[in-house]
């Protein structure tokens, strides 16, 4: 089962490809995304990586949390699903 990992305090210059490369040394990376402002396309300083294997994700979190990536000490943890409010139609 794949695990989604949150990476915070990213440098604004970090690219999705380099983020994927950092995590690929721990296991198979299914996807990586850096969250960007929808108007300016500037990084918001955080992103997500999805890894194929739970144990690889745990190793990556343990070893990369607090490490420096592109000049910034990053926060790495399992991503938590945020409950989304239901959108009911008003009639």
Image (spheres, helix red, strand yellow):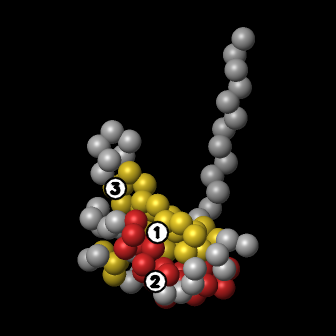
| Residue behind mark 2 | 64
Q: Quadrant of residue 54?
A: bottom right
Q: CA distance from mark 3 to mark 1?
A: 12 Å
Tell me the distance, in whole angstroms, between the alpha carbons under discs 3 and 2.
20 Å
Residue at 57% across, 70% down: 30
Q: Residues within 10 Å of mark 3 (few under 14, many from 20)?
A: some
76 with respect to 12 (left or right) = right
Residue 80 sits above or below residue 64 on the image = above
Do residues under tags 3 and 1 come within 8 Å of each other at their CB atoms?
no
Which secondary structure, mark 3? strand
Q: Which mark is residue 79?
A: none
Looking at the image, is 55 positioned above or below residue 80? below
Residue 48 horizontal/vertical position (percent): 50, 64
Label 3 vs 1, first from the N-terminus: 1
Marks 1 and 2, Cα distance to the nearest angstrom? Answer: 9 Å
For the residues labelled 1 and 2, say whether their Cβ atoms are less than 8 Å apart.
yes
Please indicate whether residue 14 sits to the left or right of residue 23 in the image.
left
Q: Quadrant of the N terminus?
A: bottom right
Q: Do the residues bearing badges 3 and 2 touch, measured as CB atoms within 8 Å?
A: no
Task: Decide: is 83 above or below 81.
Answer: above
The residue that mark 1 highlights is 7
Q: Residue 77 in the image: x percent, y percent?
A: 55, 73
Which residue bears the numbered disc 3?
A: 43
Name the secondary structure under disc 2: helix
Q: Quarter holding the C terminus?
A: top right
Please indicate, yes or no, whether residue 41 appears anywhere in the rendered image: yes
* Residue at image point 64% right, 57% down: 81
Picture quadrant of residue 34: bottom left
Residue 29 image point, x, y percent:
55, 75
Asked whether residue 6 appears in the rendered view, the answer is no
Residue 65 horizontal/vertical position (percent) = 46, 81
């Amino acid at each position: 089962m794949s695990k989604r990992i949150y990476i915070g305090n990213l440098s604004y210059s970090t690219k999705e490809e380099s983020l994927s490369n950092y995590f690929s040394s721990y296991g198979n990376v299914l996807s990586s995304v850096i969250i960007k402002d929808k108007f300016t396309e500037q990084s918001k300083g955080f992103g997500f990586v999805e890894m194929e294997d739970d144990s690889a994700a745990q190793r990556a979190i343990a070893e990369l949390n607090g490490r420096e990536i592109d000049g910034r000490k990053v926060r790495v943890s399992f991503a938590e699903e945020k409950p989304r409010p239901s959108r009911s139609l008003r009639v």
